[in-house]
Amino acid sequence: MALDADRLGEMVRARRDQLGWSQERLAQASGASQSTVDRIEKGQFKRTPEHLIRIAAAMGLHVGTVKSHLHRALAAVRKAMERKR
């Protein structure tokens, strides 16, 4: 999971930096909390896919790319959970 989640977080942070936005500004624009933005940027978005999509849309990121990374990361989480059983 870490690879896709990390890539996704890096993509969000890079775009936020490109826009010159703080995490708080992005939180306001997307309706997420600042702590949610922080977790997403760190690749720790476990239960926040809806926030991730809103954040991507608020920054003008291609939502399809974000969804693709999200689906791969969630699939990796499911696979890891199955191995632990």
Image (cartoon, rainbow, N blue to C red):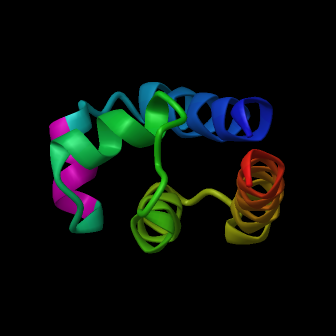
Picture residue at 48% right of the left edge, 54% below the top: 46
Picture residue at 83% right of the left edge, 55% below the top: 79
- 47 vs 19: above or below: below
Front residue of this view, candidates 39 and 85: 85
- 24 vs 60: above or below: above
Front residue of this view, candidates 68 and 76: 76
Q: In terms of image quadrants, where is residue 10?
A: top right
Q: Is residue 60 left or right of residue 36?
A: right
**Is 28 a magenta residue?**
yes
Overall secondary structure of the magenta section: helix
**Is 68 a magenta residue?**
no
Picture residue at 25% right of the left edge, 35% below the top: 23
Residue 69 in the image: state x and y as whole percent: 78, 54
- 67 vs 59: above or below: below
In the rendered picture of this protein, how many numbered marks are placed on residues?
Answer: 0
Q: Is residue 60 left or right of residue 20?
A: right
- 9 vs 54: above or below: above
Which stretch appears magenta?
24-29
Residue 68 in the image: state x and y as whole percent: 82, 63
Picture residue at 56% right of the left edge, 27% below the top: 14
In the rendered view of the protein, which quadrant contains the N terminus?
A: top right
In the rendered view of the protein, which quadrant contains the C terminus?
A: bottom right
